[in-house]
Image: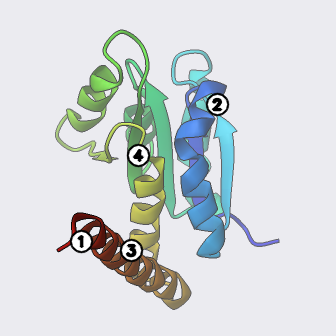
Amino acid sequence: MQKPKVLILLGSDSDINVIEDGLKFLARAGVPYMVDISSAHRDPEKTVAYAKNARKQGIEVIIAVAGMAAHLPGVIASHTTLPVIGVPASGGILKGKDALYSIVQMPRGVPVASVGIDAGSNAAILACEILSIKYDDVEKALAKLKKDLKRENNQKSLNIRKKLGN
């Protein structure tokens, strides 16, 4: 079994549904990953340990999924030099907007890349784009994804034109 290249940390178990499609893409792309729950508030020592040890363990990109205050991606970014992708999870009274703002409004020197609310698949794709700089097989998986998206979009275009008689 290959060592994971992508570490995916969830603020809680309720965040797993946000990243499930992303996990499927990572598997299709042949990118080994590891998933765990690591709350920045409930177990900050575990979160910091993950961030500090990730590079030594062969991790090259970290994805952090968190809702509400969404401090997880920022805490991780403050303890590593690896790229961190934050995924704001919907939930709470603000339906993920608070999490989005928390992730994108990081202070100078502690950047966190962000994708849209509940956009775990985009986080996985972005992680693969970062990895594709180094790994040709990942680049090929991304090229296939783009080709599939184009084909799917063209088919939808044909379907709608047929439906409307254009």
Circles 4 and 2: CB atoms closer than 8 Å:
no
In the picture, the quarter occupied by the C terminus is: bottom left
- Rounded to the nearest angstrom, the CA distance separating label 3 from label 1 is 18 Å
Q: Nearer the viewer, residue 22 or 79?
A: 22
Residue density around tag 2, few if under 14, some if 14–19, many if 20 or more, within 10 Å: some
Q: Position of residue 149 (x, y in %)?
A: 39, 74
Picture residue at 28% right of the left edge, 66% below the top: 160
Q: Please state which amino acid type lies under the numbered disc 3.
A: Leu
User: Which residue is the site of mark 1?
Assistant: 161
Identify the coloring.
Answer: rainbow
Report the disc number at residue 119: 4
Residue density around tag 4, few if under 14, some if 14–19, many if 20 or more, within 10 Å: many
- Rounded to the nearest angstrom, the CA distance separating label 2 from label 3 is 38 Å
Q: Position of residue 107 (x, y in %)?
A: 19, 34
User: Which residue is the site of mark 2?
Assistant: 46
Q: Is residue 63 left or right of residue 32?
A: left
